[in-house]
Image (spheres, rainbow, N blue to C red):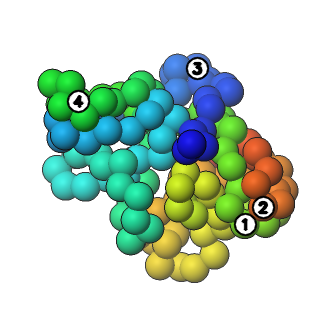
Amino acid sequence: MAKEAVMRELGPNGGNPVRFTVKDSNAFSKGAIVFLVDPKTISGATSIAIKPVAGIAAADKEASDGATDIACYTEGIADCYAGTAFVAGSLVTVSGGNYVKAANTLDKILSGMVLGRALQSASVNDVVQIKLGAKL
């Protein structure tokens, strides 16, 4: 079973949900970390290829359900699962399987792969709070 992120605090803009285009054939769960592909389209891809993070899916998306757009949270605080250990304040990116890890290489940070900033230190498999869209 996938470990989805859970939104804890949405902030004054309700998590600033942004609508993105999605292929009708795509499927992912609410809380899935989704990636940006061109043009303003998201994918719930499972590969960890260099892709910019769009946000966290605000609803379930079933394959071939007729939906071609979905909202994603781009701000707020989310509970995420740590794929590696990291310290509070680290910029984090996707580790695979909806886990997060420290974005410790410049290419990940500059290519838009940062999901947010860790608000606490984490060990592997810990649930850690991440401030989405944290400023670099």
Give how far apart the Cα atoms at labels 2 and 1 are.
5 Å
- For marks 4 and 2, the one nearer the N-term is 4
In this figure, which residue is indicated by the disc labeled 4? Answer: 69
- Residue 87 screen position, x and y as percent: 82, 63
In this figure, which residue is indicated by the disc labeled 1? Answer: 84
Q: Is residue 71 above or below residue 21?
A: above
SS class of the residue under badge 2? loop
Q: Which mark is residue 30?
A: none
Give how far apart the Cα atoms at labels 1 and 3 are.
31 Å
The mark lying in front, picked from 4 and 2, is 2
Q: Residue at x 62, y 32 (%)?
A: 6
- For marks 1 and 3, the one nearer the N-term is 3
Three-letter amino acid code at the position of disc 2: Val
- Residue 108 screen position, x and y as percent: 49, 72
Q: Residue at x 58, y 20 (%)?
A: 12
Three-letter amino acid code at the position of disc 3: Pro
Quarter of the image for residue 37 reads bottom left
Q: Is residue 64 above or below residue 95?
A: above
Three-letter amino acid code at the position of disc 1: Thr
Q: Nearer the viewer, residue 121 or 4?
A: 4
